[in-house]
Amino acid sequence: MFFLTTAIDYTNGSPHIGHAYEKVLADVIARYRRLTGEEVFFLTGVDQHGQKVQQTAEKEGVSPAEYVKTVTARFSALWEKIGVEYDGWAETTDARHITCVQSILADLHAKDQIYKKSYKGFYSVRQEQFLTDRDRNEAGEFGAEWGEVTEIEEENYYFKLSDHTPWLREFLEKSDDTILPAFRKSELLNALEKNTGADLCISRPKDRLTWGIELPFDPDFVTYVWFDALINYISFVGYTPDDSLPEFESIWTDRPVHIIGKDILVPAHGIYWLAMLHAIGFTDEKMPQLLVHGWWNKKNQSGEEEKMSKSLGNIVDPSELADTFGVDALRYYLVRDIHTGKDSNFDLDRLVMLFNTELANELGNLCNRALNMSVRFTEGIISPGGPLTDDDTALQQSLIDNTAAYRKAMDNHEISMGLEALNRHVVHCNQYAEKMKPWELNKDLAHKDRLATVLHHLAESVAHCAVLLSPILPDASAKLAAQVKLPNLTDLKLDDLKWGLIPSDHEIEKPSPVFPRIDMKSLSEDA
Ligand code: MSP
């Protein structure tokens, strides 16, 4: 089983483009793996506890439970709107999750992995964590990223993280495929070096925070939000400490892939989560792989790239984008204009340009011209014709080579490079059409077979492209399959793809554009 998860989003505010990117990336990877024939379980959801949620709910004059319900609905509505299809949905206020977190805590407590101590130190409300001198900036201060910082002294429970860091260091050093892409591994190892000896505070006193999961061994405390949230990856697939359900054994069969943003690798996933799993009893062979993606930033008026944040007021709303430009344009842009692992700059002009050039002008044009000419010149009948010329075999070779390049890129989670390979074949096809000039061939009956061959090569390519595009744009892919009158194309697996998807004497009808051009002028007139 290919078990794939994303980070669960804080239910504090509305979903933004960063959340949407991560979920679309996961959705594309899940659909691609299904296309390779693998069984897939895709889990995503929302992180509903913590001090920030409690504070925002208070400000809005509603209970935290009511507040998270409203915000959760915004997330799930967005995923439905933009075609993010998951198999499991994690909400951390769910009773199933709470029971699992509490039984893990009780188990670790019984195994002496949790102890109580008093600690005096600086605390960041925004990040909901204690700070140390290592968190000060060069000027010796706690920077703006920590928000309000106060000094507090309190008793809390600690998880013996330090018992597991020697194992973690050794495990990471010898593993080349736990942290993807690999360049992030050194960042994690450096952080681990600094972290030696530190344990993790996993509780918050109820007089400060009530909106959390109560500790099973001390009702005066709730669980630290990260300790609670990370457990979603196992609680929602049937894990229990003493006797996991068959469901768990069937889903967590190998190493799952957790997709996360670069901001939550260190320390949350790379240190806390792996150490927690080790303490719980997971073996090295069952440790998750962390696929760490970069950030979508936004250029400010001086042209500098900035993080998107509520305080800077530069948040992009994915739902509005889907309304304005369509779901296809949004999904395509989100995985096309970023290399997995790297940052990118969110740019509306590029969203429109990429849709108009690669989808409307190239793939859409290929589909329209291939099918329109078949309707006009061969009464809608597509047949192989023959014999083949060098141009025909070169087109078939381009399809073989680019499908292989697509698969290699997609296997490495490099969606943008997968799409580049697909586009290379489409461009090849359009150049082939220009060179073969079927409209000229149509003028002379003597070229009837040649005309059939050319149109067949173009239509066959459209059929292949519909399958290759399906993880990224499932709806558009189904429309392309319907236009070539092969609705079953969408049931094919990648290994079924070979020349000859279109049967002999196959009849099609006049197409209608699957990718109508986005016209910025008329959009601004509408606004
Ligand atoms: N609740 C935690 C995750 C807990 S996982 C057990 C959290 N939530 S979040 O809402 O702040 O972020 C959710 C995901 O969105 C993270 O992986 C984060 O990196 C990602 N993104 C948030 N802003 C982003 C961008 N601007 N660009 C790309 N992804 C970013 O962290």
Image (cartoon, helix red, strand yellow):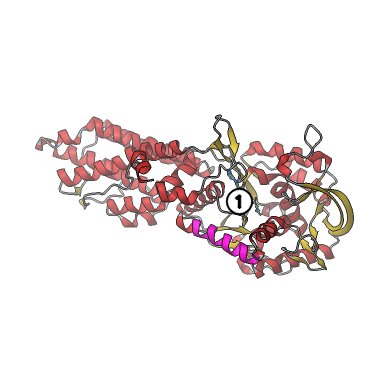
Q: Do we see residue 457 in this rendering?
A: yes
Q: Classify residue 307 as left or right of residue 216.
A: left
Q: Residue at x 36, y 48 (%)?
A: 466
* Residue at (87, 56) in percent of width and height: 154
Q: Is residue 516 above or below residue 31?
A: above
Please state if 36 lies on the left or on the right of 378 as rendered: right
User: What stretch of residues is rendered in magenta?
Assistant: 65-78
Q: Secondary structure at mark 1?
A: strand
In the picture shown, does residue 391 fall above or below 195? above
Task: Decide if residue 157 is on the left or right side of residue 519.
Answer: right
User: The disc labelled 1 sits on which kind of residue?
Assistant: Val
Q: Is residue 76 magenta?
A: yes
Q: Residues within 10 Å of mark 1 (few under 14, many from 20)?
A: many
Quadrant in which residue 525 is drawn: top left
Residue denoted by label 1: 257
Residue 451 position, x and y percent, is 18, 38
Relative image position of residue 63 (x, y in whole percent): 66, 66
